[in-house]
Amino acid sequence: MSMLTPVGEPIEMKRYTGPQRAAALMLALGKDHGAPIWAQLSVEEIKELSSAIAQLGRVPATVVEHLLVRFTGELSGRSSLHGSFDSVERLLDGVVPEDRVKEIMEDIRGPSGRTMWDKLSNVNENVLAAYLKHEYPQTIAVIVHKLSSDHAARVLAALPRELSVDVVMRMLRIDTVQKEIIQQVEDTLKHEFMSNLSRAQRRDPFETMAEVFNALDRSTEEQMLGALDEAAPDAAARIRALMFTFEDLASLMPKSIQVIVKNADKREIALALKGATDEMKQVFFAGMTERAAKLLRDDMAAMGPVRARECEEAQSSLVRLAKSLADRRQILLVDPKAEESMIY
């Protein structure tokens, strides 16, 4: 029988909801064939689909075959597919909140920023240096001259030694660069570097999944990791090793905790600590003034009983805040599971 031949829906199919059918299909497609679909989903959709997969259980072969036949048939009915930034934006419109769509599009188009130089300052120094080392030293000097001093220093350190010295000498002689030259450099960066940056960068899929698991609620996370332990124990272990958890915040320097406390919503801290161990509570109290710690204790006591899920969500939110602050180099994250003792 041809894979494209229409078949009647098996009786067992009636037991499965829409999310369960999607979960079974993604399991059948597997990692390689399913990856492009996962990449199109929002965090909330990934959470819902992951939860459905974790609770799916055994699926009859007739159901799997029917789902694959329908999927293949509907896909083959299209004459062609064309992927582009515009098509991604159209797909997300109405499915993801408008502000989230904007954030996603800025991310896949390239580092965010108001101007080209803002965007360039958000590019990893090693990535930028790898691109610049093939340019003329004078061009590199113009570009590095426009960067913030700390980013410029890191880029220069990542360049080959002779080239970086040459660039520094040219930067010392830079007077006023003509507007036309600056515009030409900007255009070159935009078309030859920024437009290809997102394609050139390849993230470790295990890092991506570790971030996804960090965003899951605790019960779903445990279910998914439990299922992975049985299906792919090595993958589960690697994901666990890459996950940065609320408990890992205990390894941060006191100054980093102070920055987190300063930037976090006070009710969120109270909720997070309400469900935390005494050790974790002390870590945060130590990063506050005596008066602020007392007020926080009073707020926690006044809350009365709270749902465990709310505490877990608040803890996950603090982890995301810590990572965001680390990305902006406002704090230093210490990852006890990493081979190196410190990571940015």
Image (cartoon, rainbow, N blue to C red):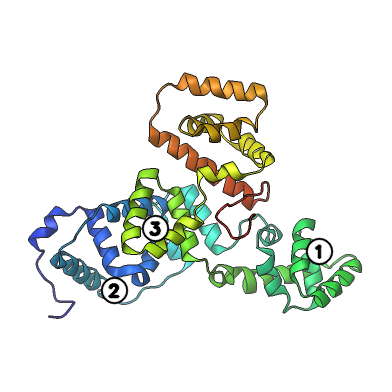
Q: Nearer the viewer, residue 2 or 284?
A: 284
Lower sequence index among marks 1 and 2: 2
Kind of residue sitting beneath label 1: His
How many numbered discs sit on the rendered protein?
Answer: 3
Numbered circle sitting on residue 145: 1
Label 3 to label 2, Cα distance in Å? 21 Å
Residue at mark 3: 41
Q: Residues within 10 Å of mark 3 (few under 14, many from 20)?
A: some
Q: Residues within 10 Å of mark 2 (few under 14, many from 20)?
A: few
Q: Is residue 46 visible?
A: yes
Height in image: 160 above or below 291? below
Quadrant containing the N terminus is: bottom left
Lower sequence index among marks 3 and 2: 3
Looking at the image, is mark 3 or mark 2 nearer the viewer?
3
Q: Which of the 4 image quarters holds residue 73? A: bottom left
Say left or right for 52 vs 69.
right
Quadrant containing the C terminus is: bottom right
Q: Nearer the viewer, residue 263 or 274?
A: 274
Tell me whether circle 3 and circle 2 mark residues in contact (CB < 8 Å): no
Residue at image point 63% right, 59% down: 340
Kind of residue sitting beneath label 2: Arg
